[in-house]
Image: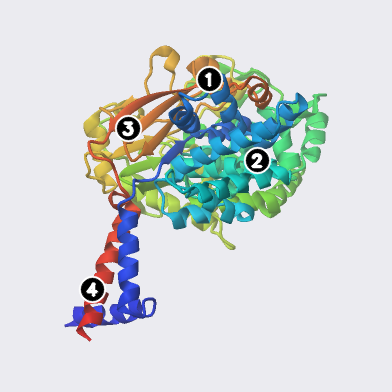
Amino acid sequence: MNRDKENVKYLKLLKQNYSSSQAVIREIINLSAITNLPKGTEFFLSDIHGEYEAFLHIMNNCSGVIKEKVDIILGETLSEFDRQELCTLIYYPREKMTMLAEIDRIDNDWYSMTLNYLIMLAKLLSSKYTRSKVRKALPEDYAYIIDELLHAQKNEDTNKVSYHRHILQTIIDLDDADEFIIALSTLIKRLAVDHLHIVGDIFDRGGNADKIIDLLMNYHSLDIEWGNHDILWMGAACGNDACICNVIRNNLKYGNVEILENAYGISLRHLMLFGMSKYGIEDAIQAALAAIKVILFKLEGQLIKRHPEYGMDDRLLLEHIDLDEGFVTVNGVKAKLKTNIFPTLNKENPYELTAEENEIMLKLHRSFVSGQRLNNHIKFLYDKGGMYNVYNRNLIYHGCVPVDENGIFDMLCINGKCYHGKALFDICDEKARAAYTDNPSQDDVDFMWFLWGGEKSPLCGRKVKTFERDYIEDKSFWKEKSNPYYSKYYDESFCIQILHEFGLYDTHSHIINGHTPVHALDGEHPVRANERLFVIDGGFCRSMNKTTGIAGYTLIFNSHGLRLKAHTPFTSVEDVLINNTDIKSESEIVEKDVYRMFVKDTDIGKKLLEDIADLKMLLDNYRKL
């Protein structure tokens, strides 16, 4: 009886949107048509690490999809050179046309041919979407014109053909062809990818993470799975001083002062002057780096002492330094220090900041917490991101699911309660969000640092040896032990156990994983566990290209199945424009669906099918009146 009352109430609410049976019928027809369209293309990228130019290019060429479509349509019409030049035009339309104009390559015939090629390509890419969805994607200034041209038919009569030809000629005659080409190129790239997944680590070694986030903020449809470097910046914006010091240390180490000072307005002047004065180092960057490292290990020590539940007492190394002998004792073993210059270290209280260090941290803290542009970017990461995502039968996360040596989900105790598996991810997500509120608890803010560098953190999954790398000469102390997850995830049954933990029982479900570079040079392959897990560290970081042998992987999931793309390193935008070079992307089909996947097979489609069922109930209700 109660359920009948609930149904009546629900149908009354539905009637507010559909005032007649005919309105319901129209919507059922519309939604049914949508569910029978091919599934849109999903694009997975990971570990961008601030490499803006390489990221921009892979977004522009849609991991090689644009080139594939150009070859399909124009493979028998244009030479390889001309097809590649057309691709370059689509990737960088304004820059390419400027260059072509300078060498007198552009005339009315060029405009006419180019516009026709671009319209052909846009038609092909728009064919899997509803006309309504395509209209919403059209550039506002040219929406009506492009809509007309996209829906021109092959068998149109002479008058209609003349009408469409006249539209293009008028655009050329009015000197508006450049802007129209830019609009068409933007639409083509927009239609090539329906949804984007960023599987962590927008920040790190490269210096332009801010530009990457600016680009992503204007992207039509995406989600972000936080990486350890993302959470580090998020923790800094939450006011975690240990995170702030790690951010500054990393950017000083990799020569990325510009992202701090120019992009986010965080002045390092006071820190540099302090380092030069206190450590006797003339180079301002190196002086600041020497100073921030000591402050960092002091603050981390304070945090570890506040949280014995983190189980990280072995990271308390400042108290084991012997400056007279020039050694530090690590797990009972003496190791020679690279330097014995620790002018602010108090032997009696090694984790206490000096008055001047405190003053420096207060200023830096204020800059990170109140910086407008940084916080706009961090808010975007919170709005679009999370610890993991379950999307269209795939489980997506950056790091690992912590396990013990036997492959059993490992426990982490938080506030007296222990969590593992999915519950651990959920509580980590909850605490990370709580840290970025108006009045966060100290516990939640501290936890952001644990997420960055804790051995049992799903975003880290290793024992971080920052101190050893910075101060110990013997490299045998640098080895960072990884969570057993990284040796177990080659086993199919282990991966199925994880998928089941997150509610995925489909035989076509996969884990999409970032975080660890795939060393193709050493024979490593990104496909693991009998095609149940894919490691797609994007390899954008230039410093990693020599050791991995490639520039990483991306993954494409379209209506036909999954394709893994291996990429060559990016050269430069200038090289692309002059020589039409591209990131070469070797494609490997890792799973081909026996039946083509349609919208009705996706998460959105399942919701639409539920809506259709509700609408049919409403229609029956109307017909009974």
* Quadrant placement of the N terminus: bottom left
Residue that mark 4 sits on = 617
> In the rendered image, which quarter is residue 355 located in?
top right
The label on residue 79 is 1
Residue that mark 3 sits on = 533
Residue ID at (50%, 39%): 120
> In the rendered image, which quarter is residue 49 located in?
top right
Earlier-in-chain disc, 3 versus 4: 3
Q: Position of residue 56 (x, y in %)?
A: 59, 35
Residue that mark 2 sits on = 211
Q: Position of residue 319 (x, y in %)?
A: 58, 32
The three-letter code of the residue at mark 2 reads Lys
Residue ID at (55%, 45%): 187
Of 163 and 408, nearer the camera is: 163
Judged by depth in the image, the label closer to the viewer, 3 or 2, is 2
The three-letter code of the residue at mark 1 reads Ser
